[in-house]
């Protein structure tokens, strides 16, 4: 059969999700953000939540998320997304409210908001992109940066005596009574992407059923910040990041 | 066992040439353009061996820019 005969609408098995806008993303080539955006857009379409979803955009690389996923968005101040999500979900109990945050936003400046929103058990979903670096501002050290990892502000590698230990925030959130689902996923292979999609679907369902806070941590790459190619960053992530941030469910009530 | 034939199309203007689809493809169908670039200067991906495609959608699943569409037919 000829190549051109196959490319017909009735044979299509994978298409660009309807809820992704036509804008070309500002993310670097190979950035994990694009994959997670796509999963979220696919899920909101599949679950029919287009008209009753409120996304809370963070400060960080994903600050322009509202340009790419065609649902309602609120832009939060740095780290304050869970606080804003609390208000949005309490005022609009019929809506799905999710935040989309990076590690600098969630685990550094927004630690208090994150922990207290989770402790109150707000019916929101927190999508946490952990790439162990401040990508947007030029690759500075984040709380989640691994020991020995070179960044713009730790050019000789992160040291315990100077910079402290890397912060794994998901186990802290899993220990709180308000959370119902805390999981850690990645999007580096097709299989991992499918698992991450299942996890986010479960988190969205929990929020709609008012079961408490769901946290989906996505261990991601920042190939520009790590100074590696996208394929090499995925390998580096498998080798080093998964040691400190192992994948799997941390809490599933 | 029925043979499956797939096909992929790449939105060349949107592709950023990150190479992730090339790595993910189990049938070595995709390649980055060695010389040609798109409007933004990226060596975009293209189906170098379209006849080998099995339509598994692994490339589209890992594409960060959602620029790959996958088609599949079962040959009888």
Image: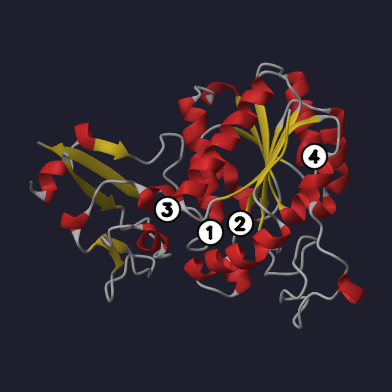
Is residue A216 placed above or below B31 in the rendered structure? above
Q: Nearer the viewer, mark 1 or mark 2?
A: 2
Chain designation of label 2:
A
Locate residue B11, reporting x and y percent: 31, 53
In the picture, measured across the screen, residue B41 lies left or right of residue A105, that is left
Q: Are marks 1 and 2 in contact (CB under 8 Å)?
A: yes
- Mark 4 falls on what kind of element? helix
Locate residue B12, reporting x and y percent: 30, 58
Mark 1 nearby-residue class (10 Å; few <14, some 14–19, many ≥20): many
Is residue B63 placed above or below B35 in the rendered structure? above
Check disc 4 and report the residue beneath it.
A174
Task: Check if mark 1 and mark 3 are on a common chain.
Answer: no
Q: Residue furthest right?
A: A161
Q: CA distance from mark 3 to mark 2?
A: 14 Å
Question: In front: A172, or B70?
Answer: A172
Check disc 2 and report the residue beneath it.
A220
Check disc 1 and report the residue beneath it.
A31
Q: Residue furthest bottom?
A: A156
- Mark 1 falls on what kind of element? loop
């Amino acid at each position: 059969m000829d190549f051109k005969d196959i490319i017909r609408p009735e044979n299509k098995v994978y298409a660009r999700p309807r809820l992704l806008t036509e804008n070309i993303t500002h993310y670097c080539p190979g950035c994990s953000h694009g994959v997670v955006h796509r999963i979220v857009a696919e899920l909101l379409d599949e679950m029919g939540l287009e008209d009753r979803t409120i996304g809370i955009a963070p400060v960080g690389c994903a600050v322009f998320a509202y340009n790419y996923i065609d649902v309602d968005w609120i832009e939060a101040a740095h780290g304050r997304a869970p606080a804003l999500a609390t208000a949005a979900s309490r005022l609009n109990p019929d809506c799905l409210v999710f935040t989309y945050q990076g590690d600098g936003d969630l685990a550094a400046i927004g630690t208090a908001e994150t922990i207290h929103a989770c402790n109150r058990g707000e019916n929101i979903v927190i999508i946490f992109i952990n790439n162990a670096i401040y990508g947007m501002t030029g690759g500075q050290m984040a709380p989640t940066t691994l020991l020995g990892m070179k960044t713009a502000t730790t050019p000789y590698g992160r040291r315990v005596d100077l910079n402290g230990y890397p912060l794994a925030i998901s186990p802290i959130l899993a220990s709180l009574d308000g959370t119902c689902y805390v999981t850690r996923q990645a999007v580096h292979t097709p299989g991992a992407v499918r698992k991450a999609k299942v996890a986010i679907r479960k988190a969205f369902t929990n929020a709609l059923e008012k079961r408490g806070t769901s946290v989906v941590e996505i261990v991601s790459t920042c190939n520009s910040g790590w100074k590696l190619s996208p394929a090499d960053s995925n390998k580096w992530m498998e080798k080093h990041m998964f040691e400190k941030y192992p994948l799997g469910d941390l809490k599933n009530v | 066992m029925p043979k499956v034939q797939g096909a992929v199309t790449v939105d060349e203007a949107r592709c950023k040439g990150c190479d992730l689809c090339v790595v993910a493809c189990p049938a070595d169908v995709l390649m980055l353009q060695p010389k040609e670039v798109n409007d933004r200067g990226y060596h975009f991906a293209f189906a170098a061996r379209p006849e080998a495609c099995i339509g598994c959608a692994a490339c589209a699943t890992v594409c960060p820019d959602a620029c790959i569409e996958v088609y599949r037919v079962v040959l009888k």
